[in-house]
Amino acid sequence: MTVDVCLSVEHVWKVFGPRPEKALQLAESGSGRSEVLAATGCTIGVRDVSFEVTRGETFVVMGLSGSGKSTLIRCAAKLTEVSKGSVSLDGEDLTAMDDEQLRQVRRHKMSMVFQHFGLFPHRRVIDNVAYGLEVQGMEKALRHARALSVIEVVGLKGWENHFPQQLSGGMQQRVGLARALAVDPEIMFFDEPFSALDPLIRRDMQDELIRLQEGLQRTIVFITHDFAEAIKLGDRIAIMKDGAFDQVGTAAELITHPATDYVREFTKEIPKAKVLTAATVVKEGRANANGRMVGLDDTIEAVLPALLNDPAPVGVEDADGHQVGVVDREAVAHVLEPEK
């Protein structure tokens, strides 16, 4: 099966400071961040990062403050020049483009949503949402029609003639999301867009993004410092530390097989039964005739009552209703066993 790659980041480095060539030379020979800084006065923001994002995938980059995640997304969106490496969108090398070519890509193929909404206070919601289409040169009636349809999609119908200051923080972020969607982008970059929101509003916005993604299937690169948010939103998650990736995988892979102590620290407090699914623990076998069945995507928390009421294995079926194996008490107990 051919993988449809939307974004490809290959061996990207970003160095800040007065002697980037020397800093790169030291870093590539194995020197750490502090050693490079002491020798050259340069900071390694991103260190030899490579990854691909397939079309329709939500790829989450998770890390603490200073890990390099925001620098990485700026390199991927070509808002920051890379020091070394390449970034390709739909097979086109962004790092080789001139300013005019980049402007065209940003107008037609990519959108960005940041923590600070960046809305125009003097423009109504509809004009904020339609701004990208205005930049493209779309006629006013057409761009307003497109903006209205997207405003309805994000749940703001009826608010199109209000100004940003008349909206709550969560509603303003919905306007930012609508503006990003209005240009029908190939890829969307989110840099901690919900981190400034109150917890309940943040959860609502996460749910909204999941709902939209189920229907629209955009390609998304999402930056966060919150592992719970990463698990909730990401098809795959990259854990970033000191400018490099420690591990990349699905939530289940990171939780069940952390590659480093750093990754293990992030995953140890996660309630596994709420995150891991039957797919994590399915094994070969057949359930009894007329036996109980669960789906591959059902959480272990949902499967547990059946196993506690009856020790017999529970059948597991795929989305088409075909049995693919069973889940038993032993497999569930093993995966839920606390880290020693």
Image (spheres, rainbow, N blue to C red):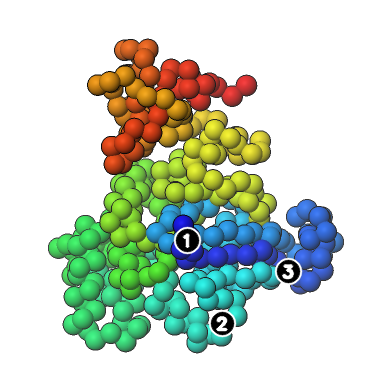
Residue placed furthest toward the left: 158
Residue 76 placement: quadrant: bottom right
Residue 46 in picture, x, y percent from top left? 66, 60
**Residue at left 64%, top 59%?**
49
106 lies above or below 255:
below
Of the numbered discs 2 and 3, the one sitting upstream in the chain is 3
Residue placed furthest toward the right: 39
Determine whether, in the image, residue 170 is placed left or right of residue 233.
left
11 lies above or below 99:
above
Find disc 2 in the rendering and name its residue.
Answer: 97
**Residue at left 54%, top 45%?**
249
Q: CA distance from mark 3 to mark 1?
A: 41 Å
* Nearer to us in this view, 279 or 96: 279
Q: Secondary structure at mark 3?
A: loop
Instruction: Identify which amino acid the numbered label 2 is placed on.
Output: Met
Residue 3 in picture, x, y percent from top left? 48, 60
Q: Are marks 2 and 3 in contact (CB under 8 Å)?
A: no
Instruction: Identify which amino acid the numbered label 3 is placed on.
Output: Gly
Find disc 3 in the rendering and name its residue.
Answer: 17
**Residue at left 79%, top 61%?**
28
Find disc 1 in the rendering and name its residue.
Answer: 2
Instruction: Identify which amino acid the numbered label 1 is placed on.
Output: Thr
Determine whether, in the image, residue 178 is placed left or right of residue 54.
left
Is residue 231 something one can see in this rendering?
yes
Q: Residues within 10 Å of mark 1 (few under 14, many from 20)?
A: few
Q: Secondary structure at mark 2?
A: loop
Q: Are marks 3 and 1 in contact (CB under 8 Å)?
A: no
Of the numbered discs 3 and 1, the one sitting upstream in the chain is 1
Q: CA distance from mark 2 to mark 3?
A: 24 Å
Depth check, mark 1 against mark 2: the one in front is: 1
